Amino acid sequence: MVILASGSPRRRELLTQAGIAFEVITSDADETPTKTVPAEIVMELSKRKGEDVYERLEREGRIDKAGETLIISADTLVFFKDERLGKPKDKADAFRMIKELSGDVHDVITGVTLAYVNQGQKKQVRFFEKTEVSVYDLTDEEIEAYIATGEPMDKAGAYAIQGFFGKYIKGINGEYANVVGLPIARLYHEIKKLGCKEALGRA
Amino acid sequence: MVILASGSPRRRELLTQAGIAFEVITSDADETPTKTVPAEIVMELSKRKGEDVYERLEREGRIDKAGETLIISADTLVFFKDERLGKPKDKADAFRMIKELSGDVHDVITGVTLAYVNQGQKKQVRFFEKTEVSVYDLTDEEIEAYIATGEPMDKAGAYAIQGFFGKYIKGINGEYANVVGLPIARLYHEIKKLGCKEALGRA
């Protein structure tokens, strides 16, 4: 059994594209970090989401003692000069964020936790992936027009690289899928190292 | 009038995503380069494709003397240690290419030519965009499984970053869309500099 502990349609799409069959169980974990370093924040939050789902499955007796269970949880944040940019509160907040990112370079960091149980043996792997994103200068009119598309409102940093904002992305350094919300190549690589047959069956 | 001188469905999708309305007129230009330097090869081929379409429009009296005409032409190639990788001839050729790219870094270079006519005034802009692509190590079984998806056969370098091969892409340095086949952000930026109102109308 492979579980994605995230309701994000973008993460679902990336996992599917990698040929991994899974079901979605979202977590109710508290998303207030105790850490302050970007990479530690996203790893802490991914760990909390994964453990929340693990504990629920365990309570419900759904951890397969004879087979494999893999829980994939992730948290993605945008950092601009160490300021953490979450989802914008409103259009003015989206404008402020995009204005900051415009003509500059920022980081997108995803923390991932893999909780893997194989025949009763439990292993946990945690990692983060960082991608630098360089954005062209946007005029205020371009920012307004982009906000009017409605795309920014549910995205950390107020933009979607895979959407209309793509034409403003000068370049990236790192994994592209990480900016979409899940570093799928790194994740696939880590799953191979874990040896989870169920996740790799359809590769 | 904005024209994309390419039949590639991927380039069409990228231009549409950038909000540019266009029609497709493919070129019959000879694609044998006289140049040897990667960036010069792709610029030469993009120029030839663009000029072929321009001359055809001119012969047919379709260049709008009072308005704007913009012809966008592009050529994308994959270079591995200066060896040019085109589309694979067959499955064995695809295997050889992917085996070469596996566990290493290669370059994807797109040359773009913009032929812009505004009220009878003609301008030509040419540029190239290079993206470095780093690929995880693939086992022979993974290469075979990837070839069996059918994806490699019509792609330069025998892979599609936006397809099933995404899970093997460790990271990139440069524009992502460039690896798909058209550096849409750079292109949009150059069109803004040219000032082509028709292409920017729906931005």
Image (cartoon, coloured by chain):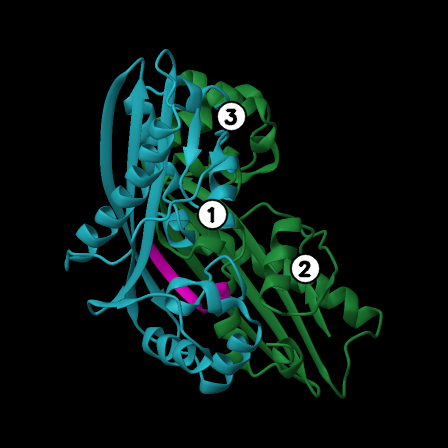
Chain colours: A cyan, B green
Q: Which residue is mark 2?
A: B5
In this rendering, position of residue A82 left or right of residue B139: left
Q: Position of residue B30 (x, y in %)?
A: 65, 48
Q: Earlier in the sequence, mark 2 or mark 3?
A: 2
In the rendered structure, which segment of residues is drawn in magenta? A165-173
* Number of the front mark, 2 or 3: 3
Mark 3 element type: helix
Tell me which corner region of the image, top left, top right, bottom left or bottom right, holds residue A127. Answer: top left
Tell me the distance, in whole angstroms, between the alpha carbons under discs 1 and 2: 40 Å
Q: Which residue is mark 1?
A: A7
* Co-location on one chain, circles 1 and 2: no
Count of marks, rendered view: 3
Q: Are marks 1 and 2 in contact (CB under 8 Å)?
A: no
Is A196 or B167 nearer to us in this picture?
A: A196
Tell me which corner region of the image, top left, top right, bottom left or bottom right, holds residue A86. Answer: bottom left
Callout 3 amino acid: Tyr
Q: Quadrant of the N terminus of chain A?
A: top left
Name, please, the residue furthest toward the front: A59
Can residue A192 be seen from the camera position used here? yes
Would you call the spot at circle 3 few (<14 residues within 10 Å), some (14-19), or many (20 or more)?
A: many
Relative height, residue A64 to residue B170 (above, below): above
Q: Which mark is residue B146?
A: 3
Q: Chain of mark 2?
A: B
Is A172 part of what is drawn in magenta?
Answer: yes
Mark 1 element type: loop
Tell me the distance, in whole angstroms, between the alpha carbons under discs 2 and 3: 30 Å
Q: Are marks 2 and 3 in contact (CB under 8 Å)?
A: no
Q: Position of residue B62 (x, y in %)?
A: 81, 74
